[in-house]
Image (cartoon, rainbow, N blue to C red):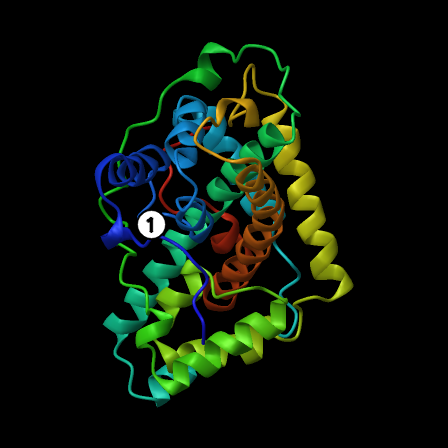
């Protein structure tokens, strides 16, 4: 399987490495999204884009927006089965099951934030800048930097170049089900649990993905994310005229990638929420597992 061009966590250096760390610290998440790693290939874009977004994403307003997207990403739980009996039958310990649920919680917490971030960048590069009112003192209140202590690191993704034939088949299944160009960070991390990932794809994802209900949910999430972006008092991304390092073809590439990744991340937000639903039900899936109280 060919790997979509990107800069991995361990490959980042200098300003880019500092930006990766800043993204994780500000969003309070344990990984840098696939979209960000791909857009790191364009000179100067990621530091400038996140520099514009940082102040907006360190607030309680941003946390509430992510909470709302998470709640609204739920699909009906019909047909979902708790995977614990199958995992126990395969010899999984309770500790390993808890570890897996912790991974799902971490992605479930962070995916709505990345949907908001990429939406802001997409709006900015297309010249649609927000004209919202200043935030109230309560909404503008800062969040603590850094991921909560109980959130695991999610850097140990299975690289397509080093994956087993079994994992490569699962990656191809992910791509074919969603019509995606590559496996997300979430699926690359879940590939560390290939027996679970195979079960999850067939029982929880395949029955719903790309159905009218699923695609309608994706569109609704993108519309909600755009509404949040346009409620802000200033830009969350970079105007293309400020990207001096990028040639016109780079601007065209970035514009297309941002448009695509909005939809990609909305899909993954729905998927991971559904996997959490299967374990613990609607209420647990929709709740923020790590955020400070923002209500």
Q: Nearer the viewer, residue 90 or 281?
A: 90
Q: Tell me: residue 95, above or below residue 7.
A: below
| Residue 80 in view | no
Quarter holding the N terminus? bottom left
Taking depth in this image into account, of 174 and 8 the one nearest to the observer is: 8
Left or right: where does residue 33 sit relative to residue 229? left
Q: Is residue 198 above or below residue 130?
A: below
Dot 1 alpha-carbon crowd within 10 angstroms: few under 14, some 14 to 19, many 20 or more: many
Image position of 22 (left or right of 229):
left
Percent position of residue 57, x then y: 43, 28
Question: Can the viewer see residue 14 in this picture?
Answer: yes
The answer to whether 181 appears left or right of 26 in the picture is right
| Local secondary structure at mark 1 | loop
The percent position of residue 210, horizontal first and vertical second, equals: 70, 66
Taking the spot 39% from the left edge, 33% from the top edge, the residue there is: 44
Q: Position of residue 86 (x, y in %)?
A: 42, 85
Q: Is residue 204 above or below residue 235?
A: below
Q: Name which residue lies at 62% across and 45% down.
A: 259
Circle 1 residue? 31
- The residue lying furthest to the right in this view is 212
Residue 21 position (above or below residue 139): below
The residue at the point 47 percent across, 83 percent down is: 169
């Amino acid at each position: 399987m060919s790997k979509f061009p990107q800069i991995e966590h361990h490959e980042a250096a200098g300003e880019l490495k500092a930006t990766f760390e800043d993204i994780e610290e500000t969003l309070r998440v344990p990984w840098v999204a696939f979209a960000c790693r791909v857009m790191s290939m364009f000179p100067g874009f990621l530091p400038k884009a996140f520099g514009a977004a940082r102040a907006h994403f360190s607030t309680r307003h941003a946390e509430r927006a992510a909470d709302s997207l998470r709640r609204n990403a739920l699909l009906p739980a019909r047909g979902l089965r708790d995977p614990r009996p199958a995992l126990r039958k395969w010899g999984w310990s309770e500790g390993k099951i808890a570890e897996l649920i912790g991974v799902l919680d971490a992605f479930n917490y962070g995916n709505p934030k990345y949907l908001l971030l990429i939406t802001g960048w997409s709006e900015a590069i297309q010249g649609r800048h927000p004209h919202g009112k200043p935030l109230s003192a309560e909404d503008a209140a800062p969040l603590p930097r850094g991921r909560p202590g109980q959130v695991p690191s999610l850097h140990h993704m299975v690289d397509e170049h080093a994956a087993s034939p079994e994992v490569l088949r699962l990656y191809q299944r992910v791509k074919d089900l969603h019509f995606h160009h590559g496996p997300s960070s979430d699926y690359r991390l879940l590939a560390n649990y290939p027996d679970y990932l195979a079960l999850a794809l067939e029982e929880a994802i395949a029955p719903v993905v790309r159905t009218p209900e699923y695609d309608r949910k994706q569109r609704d999430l993108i519309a909600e994310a755009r509404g949040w972006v346009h409620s802000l008092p200033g830009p969350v991304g970079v105007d293309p005229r400020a990207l001096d390092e990028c040639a016109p073809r780079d601007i065209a590439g970035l514009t297309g990638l941002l448009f695509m990744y909005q939809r990609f991340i909305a899909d993954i937000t729905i998927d991971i929420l559904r996997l959490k639903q299967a374990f613990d039900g609607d209420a647990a899936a929709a709740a923020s597992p790590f955020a400070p109280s923002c209500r």
